[in-house]
Amino acid sequence: MLKKFPKASDGNTFDETLFGLIADDLEKQGYSIRHGALPDDISSSLYSYQQDLNAAKYADAGIGRGEDFLKTEFVRTDEIFWIVEESDAGKKWIDWTSKLQRFLNQRLFLGLFSFESHFAHYAPGAYYKRHRDAFRGEANRVLSVVTYLNPAWGHSDGGELVLYSDDQDREGLKVVPLYGTLVFFLSEEFPHEVLPATRDRYSIAGWFRVNNSINNNIDPPR
Ligand code: OGA
Ligand code: MN
């Protein structure tokens, strides 16, 4: 008989089953929302790492980067902390996202070249107004990913991510920022926003990028 379901102990097969579902969603609708999908050893490492981070380590979030950097409370009021491989949790997360990157490149020919991601803390009342993730003059963010580190989050806690299908869409699709939920969407296609919450809200936002060569220099990952 054919073996239909992968064994949970077989890490790679297990990942690839999820990666296949994400690829199918992206192909069909340009986004994927998967509840309880981030492997628990990664969620729990990221969760404890996030807990350990001193609030003082967070830089106030701004829009754009480099000379484009501008901080504006009008657009977003969260705080961010970039994730690098030096930490154990960061390494686990980045290993997993690179596996996914390879899988999506093979399956969907996306040509994803690098990945960057940060923790974000939204204090009660903090928000991120409707925006797109592909930056001005830098259309190299192709695929956005968001995951959440908030156990036991309920509807009354607010803080939903609202994903809009286009500029005309006023209703959107609300995603509760619950621990383990993974959201993917094409960065240039979907306007989205973060509604204010009544509790501290922790998320990770990341972007898979294609390579943009400027003056023959390879555009490096951050
Ligand atoms: C972002 C973002 C969504 C979220 O950081 O660009 O849209 O739910 N985050 O935290
Ligand atoms: Mn965004």
Image: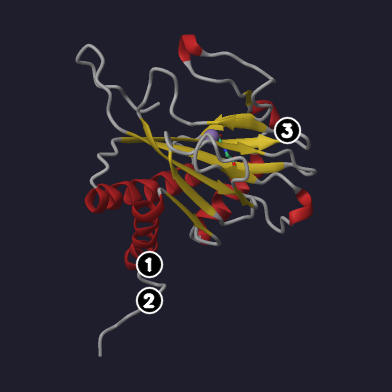
135 relative to 28 in the view: left or right:
right
Choose top left, top right, bottom left or bottom right for residue 94.
top left
The span from disc 1 to disc 2 (Cα, nearest Å) is: 7 Å
> How busy is the neighbourhood of tag 1: few (under 14 within 10 Å), some, or many (20 plus)?
some
Q: Residue under circle 1?
A: 14
217 relative to 208 in the view: left or right:
left
Contact check, label 2 and label 3, Cβ < 8 Å: no
Q: Residue under circle 2?
A: 7
199 vs 95, nearest the viewer: 199
What's under tag 3, amino acid-wise? Ala
130 vs 4, nearest the viewer: 130
Q: Which mark is residue 208?
A: none
Q: Residue under circle 3?
A: 126
* Beta carbon of the mark 1 residue lies under 8 A of ligand 1: no
The span from disc 1 to disc 3 (Cα, nearest Å) is: 36 Å
Contact check, label 1 and label 2, Cβ < 8 Å: yes
Q: Secondary structure at mark 2?
A: loop
Q: Secondary structure at mark 1?
A: helix
Q: Earlier in the sequence, mark 1 or mark 2?
A: 2
- Tally the marks: 3
70 relative to 214 in the view: left or right:
right
What's under tag 2, amino acid-wise? Lys
Give percent across and percent down for residue 182: 51, 53
Residue name at image x 69 percent, y 20 percent: 73
Residue name at image x 48 percent, y 39 percent: 190
Residue name at image x 30 percent, y 32 percent: 210
* Beta carbon of the mark 3 residue lies under 8 A of ligand 1: no
Q: Is residue 4 above or below residue 54?
A: below
Give percent across and percent down for residue 150: 67, 51
